[in-house]
Amino acid sequence: MADQHNPLPRAQVQVDLDAIRYNVDQLTRLAARTGAQTMAVIKADAYGHGALAVGNAALAAGASWLGVASVDEALALRGAGIQSRVFCWLHTVDDNFGPAVAAGIHLSVASLRQLWAVNSAARAVGVEAKVHLKIDTGLTRSGCQPAEWSALVEAAATAQAEGSLEVAGVWSHLACADEPGHPSVDRQAARLDDAYKVAANAGLNPIRHIANSAATLTRPDLHFDLVRPGIAVYGLNPVPGSATLRPAMSFRSTVSLARRVPAGEAVSYGHTWTTESETTLALVPVGYADGIPRTLSGRMEVWLGGRRRPVVGRVCMDQIVVDCGDDPITDGDEVLLFGPGDRGEPTAREWADTIGTIDYEIVTGMYRPRVSRSYVGGRR
């Protein structure tokens, strides 16, 4: 039962910073074997784990770069006192690059329009911009098309010669690295190599990077100068069996009402489940508004009272019901909805596999207004 003086919240995500540091240490060691540095990707509030806390933990564990998607995310890190190299890559047409350039943020550039926007911002603030030219090697999302690459490189080389920017990197992103042996991986690596040679022939001397979590773990030949692990930082392995990582996030709540219910009573919306005999049902005050996918209805368990127990009936917006049989469950007992799996509790990967998605979506989706977040493990 929860401590009366320190009650558990209605819904809480707990992040183990020791697990973050352990994972980053493992990843940086792998990268160091090939001479590469490590960028810990902490976009989307560190996949729901908290960007500032995770960023500091990653840097303490050996990462030398942090990666985010947006300029706003990058500037928030600077505003919180993080002075490491920060890279961001997903821009809108209205982004003001001036503050980012002034703050020393490394910016991705995938088109001539973006190049001119960053170059103009650099001139306006009087600071040399650090840019990484992105080549589309086959993900076909963002990135400069190969047919337009030479023009982008030439323009960037001219701007560098004029002193307004430095081409610090040439980079791309892999589409299928989490499928070892997929032929697209080698094709994308070859296209990156071709793009890099164009940049080198133009007199540029940038670093190269393409390796995400999966490639960091399984393709040391693609580490180049820098690796960019994301999901692996949080202990979720995109290539199971390739490394031992520690999941950092747990999701907890408490029993708000435990009561005995007779046989023959239907439970929750739609009456999809009915008690077969007298049983104890535990009401837990979390639902799909708090990150539990409604598609887990009838297909999930929780850890309660020392073992796994089924959630019965439909997942509601604000609550779920757990069948506890004849065990002595009381109001205030802790409920672990998912965790690292050390005790046999459900995991984020289990949730994802059950509903046919990826664990990235599960943990990132836990950043919700009614879900508090706490940290354990060393300094915050």
Image (cartoon, rainbow, N blue to C red):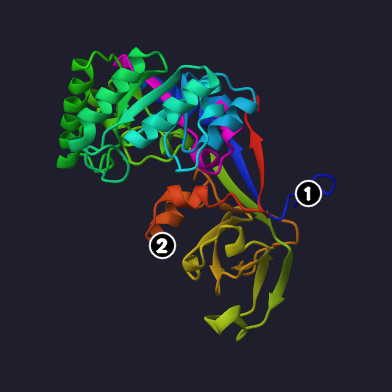
* Kind of residue at disc 2: Ile
**In this view, 171 is above or below 335:** above
Q: Quadrant of residue 285?
A: bottom right
Task: State the SS at label 2.
Answer: helix
Queried whether the magenta region covers residue 99, the answer comes back as: no
Q: Which residue is mark 2?
A: 355
Name the spot of residue 307 as percent of width and height, x first: 56, 55
* Front residue (pair 138, 327): 138
Q: Is residue 177 left or right of residue 3?
A: left
| Magenta residues, start to end | 33-55
Q: Is residue 80 left or right of residue 6?
A: left
Residue 59's label in the rendered image is none
Name the spot of residue 252 as percent of width and height, x first: 63, 51
Task: Kindly identify the residue that appears in the image at 44 percent across and 40 percent down.
Answer: 91
Task: Kindly identify the residue that appears in the image at 31 percent across and 14 percent down.
Answer: 35
Q: How many marks?
A: 2
* Front residue (pair 326, 41): 41
In this view, the residue farthest toward the right is 5
Name the spot of residue 231 as percent of width and height, x first: 42, 39
Residue 7's label in the rendered image is 1
In this view, the residue farthest toward the bottom is 264
Q: Residues within 10 Å of mark 2 (few under 14, many from 20)?
A: some
